[in-house]
Image (spheres, grey):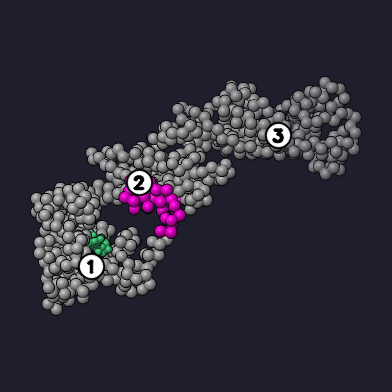
Amino acid sequence: MRMLERETLAQFGFDVLEAESGEQALEILAKRQPDLVLLDVDMPGIDGFEVCRRLRQRWDMTGVPVIMVTGLDDPASIDEAYEAGANDFVAKPINWPILGRRARQVLRSAQAVRQLCELREKQGAVMRAIPDMIFVIDWQGTYLDYKPGSVRTSVRFEQRFLGKNISALLPPDASGLVQQAIDAALLSGKLQSVIYSLPLEGEIHYHEARVVPDGVDKVVIVVRDMTAEKLGEEKILRLAYFDTLTDMPNRQSFLEHLDLELQRARRDNIRVALLFLDLDGFKRINDTFGHGAGDTLLQEVAMRMKEKLRAGDFVARPASDAAAIHFARLGGDEFTVVLTGIEDTQMVGQIAARLQALLAMPFLIGDREVTVTLSIGIAIFPEDGEDAATLLKHADTAMYHAKDQGRNNWQLYSGAMTVQTAERLAVEADLRKGLDRGEFRLVYQPQVNAADGTVVGIEALIRWQHPERGMISPAQFIPVAEESGLIVPLGDWVLNAVCVQVRDWQQRGVFTPRVAINVSARQFRAPHFLDSVAEIIAESGISAEQLELELTESILMDPESRQVQGMYRLRALGVHFSIDDFGTGYSSLSYLKHFPIGMLKIDQSFVRGVPDRVNDAGIATAIIAMARSLDLDVIAEGVETRGQLEFLRAAQCPRVQGYLFSRPLPPDEIEPHLRRGSIALPATASAD
Ligand code: C2E
Ligand code: MG
Ligand code: MG
């Protein structure tokens, strides 16, 4: 029998080792590991079943296929063969041609099983290496199996959860999401991914569940705790869309929001208002109290706005909800408000006024009370612009007009403003050229003793001799020069030209009184202005006593100490200081003490009203009296009539300046007046 088996198997390409008994078989197998074992049940000594059982107990033999050769085709011994660990059986009498094929088949399937085992082991290792929790869940949401994650996860999933439904373990919204994903995965046969949040130990955790269909009625779900990623993402989003100083939506967020609102407005045919807010005098606060205080102020402003905007009562209309107002910080002291679904511009105006009223109450910065006002420009979709960029530009233009109108007010955009802005730009470019080409001139207007007409000074006033547009008044280009910063080189030019003129007159023996020069605020605040005055005087070689700088009241509001010191230095050199257009600004005489001011120039607007208008007369008289008590000189500007002169004389105003005596004149025309040293009132002047 053994010989026949060996011959048959050899024909099928097997190498065959033979054993006469079970004991001998076990001995051989201890030294060599075969690919296949053919075992007869009936053997001397221990039988085939026993040999098979012992084989199976050896770890290295578990995978080796065993075919049992049973005596009879009886079911009991076949069962026993399988129980002992056999892979297959062959019944006697042996069908020889079949034996070889059977052996080959068993060998092949054993190999397949071995490969499968190896694969499973590998997969097991991979699974263990995956930090995520993995669940098998049936189509109804019942947990069938799970693998705990190997890293710290926020959920402890335990064996006892198996058989339970996800709705019993997850909060309703999370389990709803997961169940939806399961349905979708089974329906589409494709991977689904959902993120849900879980409150755990007082914190919100975010889980991502990736649901993969596994057959038609169950899914595999890979769950990952992605709280850290999610928070990082939110932080990045916050950084991208929120201003770090005030925690308000930033420029980017504003632009995106406005875009969305405009899309909606186009579709629904409604209007959107864009309010551009700018704090007045914020720079002054920054300069005076420091940037820390400036930052605090911005935070306080933002907070107040946020609080009030959130309260639904801010906009008094039924349809209003807080979401209809979007408030953002563009940067610096600029803010925007977007209002949707507005009915009329009047309503927008009311809201603008309310925003202003909101800031009217002082802010407490440190131990100081600070008040700020707000200039607001308004542009409305679709009238003032179809897209965000245009609306923003126009609201900005309107805001500048609000500033020009004396701040603390709001302006609706109008097309004319853009024309004006364009004009401004053209003027600015022209100014630059004019400076290069030497198109500027100075004219001089005498200042005389009110009693006898003696020339006590002259004021230098700039003129622009434009090649095409002729003579341009400073009222038209000084504001543009100030805004563009060109006032600094322009001011230097004036200072130089005056010094050169004074030296020329002095060299030619012309009596030269003190010359007043106008200094604008922007020029005065330029870093090297006060030093450059001293330099220019020194270079020209004239006496500093010859010069007087006319400042405006606004310059004296919160100047930097460096500037005050600079003024005292110049005063020590001999330079005089006066306040131009006095009475139109803050009109507080008390702060004048802090500066080396020698003279006040009563503004033309008051002089124009005397003697008839009681208010003006009163103010003019009061300024003259107060100036005297403070030991300051006074000059009245814009004196045009005898009546005005008489009034001023009666009020004991020592000096006057105005058309009544002389218009501003070019150097060669004023020279005769200087040589004479006094100006007589023309006979015709007495007619008015
Ligand atoms: P301001 O310094 O108050 O100069 C007085 C203005 O009143 C001058 O106008 C002058 O021509 C005008 N004026 C003088 N007397 C009379 C009068 O009796 N009646 C009337 N109605 N007006 C009179 P101007 O020259 O057009 O200058 C306007 C403003 O431009 C000046 O006001 C001053 O603030 C500014 N400005 C002029 N020259 C310069 C300059 O060189 N630098 C700077 N920064 N500003 C200048
Ligand atoms: Mg002046
Ligand atoms: Mg003036």
Which residue: 17% across, 63% down? 686
Q: Amino acid at mark 2?
A: Asn
Q: Label 2 neighbourhood size at 10 Å, few (<14), some (14-19), many (20+)?
A: many
Tag shown at residue 664: 1
Left or right: 654, with 10 as reference point: left
**Dot 1: element:** loop
Q: Residue tagged by mark 3?
A: 187
- Asked if residue 90 can be seen in this view, the reply is yes
In this rendering, is residue 469 above or below 652? below
Q: Is mark 1 within 8 Å of ligand 1?
A: yes
Question: Which residue is more in the foreground, 672 or 179?
Answer: 672
Mark 3 or mark 1, whichever is nearer to me: 1
Left or right: 500, with 261 as reference point: left
Left or right: 301, with 391 as reference point: left
Q: CA distance from mark 2 to mark 1?
A: 36 Å
Q: Position of residue 156 (x, y in %)?
A: 53, 27
Q: CA distance from mark 2 to mark 3?
A: 62 Å
Q: Residue tagged by mark 2?
A: 409
Which residue: 44% across, 40% down? 347
> Counting residues from the N terminus, which is met first, the one under dot 2 or under dot 1?
2
Q: Are marks 3 and 1 in contact (CB under 8 Å)?
A: no
Q: Which residues are magenta?
A: 392-421
Which residue: 63% across, 29% down? 179
- Residue 320: say if magenta: no
> Counting residues from the N terminus, which is met first, the one under dot 3 or under dot 1?
3
Q: Position of residue 101 (x, y in %)?
A: 85, 38
